[in-house]
Image (spheres, grey):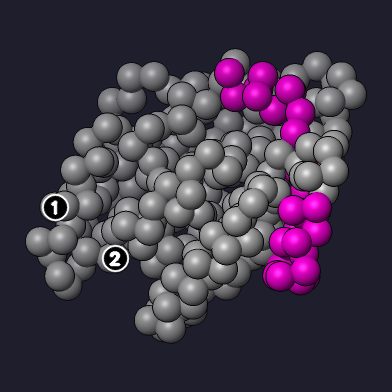
Amino acid sequence: VNQKGGVGKTTTALGLASAAWARRIPSLVVDLDPQGNATTGLGLWAPATNVDEALASDRPGVVANLALPSGWPNDKGLPPMVVASTPALAGRERQLLSDPVGAQDRLRVALSGSQSLVLIDCPPSLGLLTINALFAADAALVVTEPSAWASDGVSEIMRTIERVAARKPSGLRVAGVAVNRLARTRDSRYWNEQLIADHGQLVLPPVRLRAAVAEAAARSRPIHSLPPRRGAAEACVEFDLLYDLVVGTPGPEDRNGL
């Protein structure tokens, strides 16, 4: 989660889904971004159902009827299920504003009963779509990149997470700060060090800037399925480590994440 666009939230969600794919762990990706990049990155271009239908409903567990198989291969891994995005999400926030009681809780209700690991890809805003994701989640992963003002953006989303946690009986754990696209430049290293100085142990080992990550997304394939060239293999190691630190082994009461 991050209110800023272009920091790699979708890349991180797909990388974690790929790590689950390689381990044959059942997972569900919920694409809350109207741009739908996670949906296409998972191999769906004309989904028959979408997440807007879940947000329009107040029926518990409705996601079970809306989740679709992804287009990822099943020869070496377990493809995730997907609750696809739609451009109609852009107008859903305005409609949610007309429901002062349940506006922030629609996604949590829709996901009730889910037994899979749930990864929610959030839009680049702090509107009601993101708030729904936070209320539905057990843990929030803040995604950023090492650039100027990145730390300020992390601090802002942390304040939002704290406010949501105070209003949830189960609370909301911060899984960490994932630093995406760390380049081999002095500037990139400097801003990564600033993030560590400001947020300490919350800052997780980075995912470096690699062509293989962009290639996997462009081909709508899990990064773990690419030929084991150096860049792809190193990216897999980084996403595997991130998965271990953020997800670990989810139990029935700890399955929803960002």
| Distance from Cα at disc 1 to Cα at disc 2 | 14 Å
Q: Is residue 141 left or right of residue 113?
A: right
Please say whether residue 206 is one of the residues in the magenta stretch.
yes
Q: Is residue 47 left or right of residue 165?
A: left
Percent of width and height locating residue 133: 40, 58
Percent of width and height locating residue 200: 76, 71
Sequence-wise first label, 1 or 2: 1
Please say whether residue 152 is one of the residues in the magenta stretch.
no
Marker disc for residue 225: none
Is any atom of residue 17 visible in this view? Answer: no
Question: Number of labelled discs?
Answer: 2
Quickly name the residue at label 1: 95
The residue located at (85%, 43%) in the rendering is: 186
Residue 55, above or below 104? above
Percent of width and height locating residue 68: 40, 32
Q: Nearer the viewer, residue 28 or 211?
A: 211
> In the rendered structure, which segment of residues is drawn in magenta?
190-218
Quarter holding residue 175: bottom right
Asked which secondary structure carries label 2, the reply is: loop
The disc labelled 1 sits on which kind of residue?
Answer: Gln
Residue 184, above or below 117? above
The disc labelled 2 sits on which kind of residue?
Answer: Asp
Q: Is residue 171 left or right of residue 238?
A: left
Q: Residue furthest left?
A: 98
Quickly name the residue at label 2: 105
Q: Is residue 12 left or right of residue 171?
A: right
| Label 2 neighbour load within 10 Å: few <14, some 14-19, many 20+ | some
Is any atom of residue 173 visible in this view? Answer: yes
SS assignment for the magenta stretch, majority: helix
The residue located at (43%, 47%) in the rendering is: 124
Asked which secondary structure carries label 1, the reply is: helix
